[in-house]
Image (cartoon, rainbow, N blue to C red):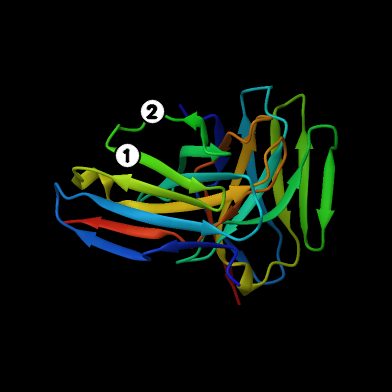
Amino acid sequence: DTAVSQTPKYLVTQMGNDKSIKCEQNLGHDTMYWYKQDSKKFLKIMFSYNNKELIINETVPNRFSPKSPDKAHLNLHINSLELGDSAVYFCASSLLGGNQPQHFGDGTRLSIL
Amino acid sequence: QQQVKQSPQSLIVQKGGISIINCAYENTAFDYFPWYQQFPGKGPALLIAIRPDVSEKKEGRFTISFNKSAKQFSLHIMDSQPGDSATYFCAASYNNNDMRFGAGTRLTVKP
């Protein structure tokens, strides 16, 4: 009964490839997020979605695109992968509104060869 | 630019001691200040949070102290245990859930 689940846990791929990371939450939350954690453990928000609408879009390359088929899912598609994309990507979810705690998945470690 | 500054980067404490991690923010629009705990291979998990209308919040061994005028807040872990060894992140958010994280503090509690 994992609350926020991501797949795959590990993703190793070649530079230039296109890949996707899936995220699902069963908490009944209406907002989902993607974060990037770099090698120094710094966490930075990339996207958030509420009711299928993008409400935050940080200055990430347009090679990254979030796709939300429904409230419980927010997938991350990455095109033309680059070495600098190597990081751990975390999905999170929360209820909409101020001061709502975010619940994180266990991350997807992306390694670009 | 980093909107939430966290220190120290790493901290070593003896078992039973007090661990103190400090954060400072710049944007007075922030209205929610959570602390997250992250173990290796896991996602961050909410530990404790505070709103700016409260100066202190305590939950078990964990206490947040908040100084609105100084734009600073800190996490105190009393009676630190080896199981507390993890990376701790402070964060701040606006009303719209735009969460900004500090750079993290790696805490090691020695037995």
Residue A6 in the image: x percent, y percent? 45, 61
Q: Nearer the viewer, residue A107 or A4?
A: A4
Residue sitting at x 35%, y 39%: A65
Determine whether label 1 and label 2 are within 8 Å by CB.
no
Chain of residue at mark 2: A
Res A88 → quadrant: bottom left
Q: Is residue B85 above or below residue A98?
A: below
Q: Is residue A34 left or right of residue A77?
A: right
- Closer to us: B12 or A66: A66
Where is mark 1, residue-wise?
A: A64
Give SS at disc 2: loop
Query: Which residue is depicted at the point 69% across and 30% down?
Result: B95
Q: Secondary structure at mark 1?
A: strand
Q: Height in image: A3 above or below A20?
A: below
Q: How far from the left and from the top, in percent, is residue B15? A: 66, 72
Q: Which residue is mark 2?
A: A59
Question: Where residue A16 sits: x, y (%)?
Answer: 14, 46
On screen, residue A24 versus residue A30, left or right, reads left
Q: Amino acid at mark 2?
A: Thr
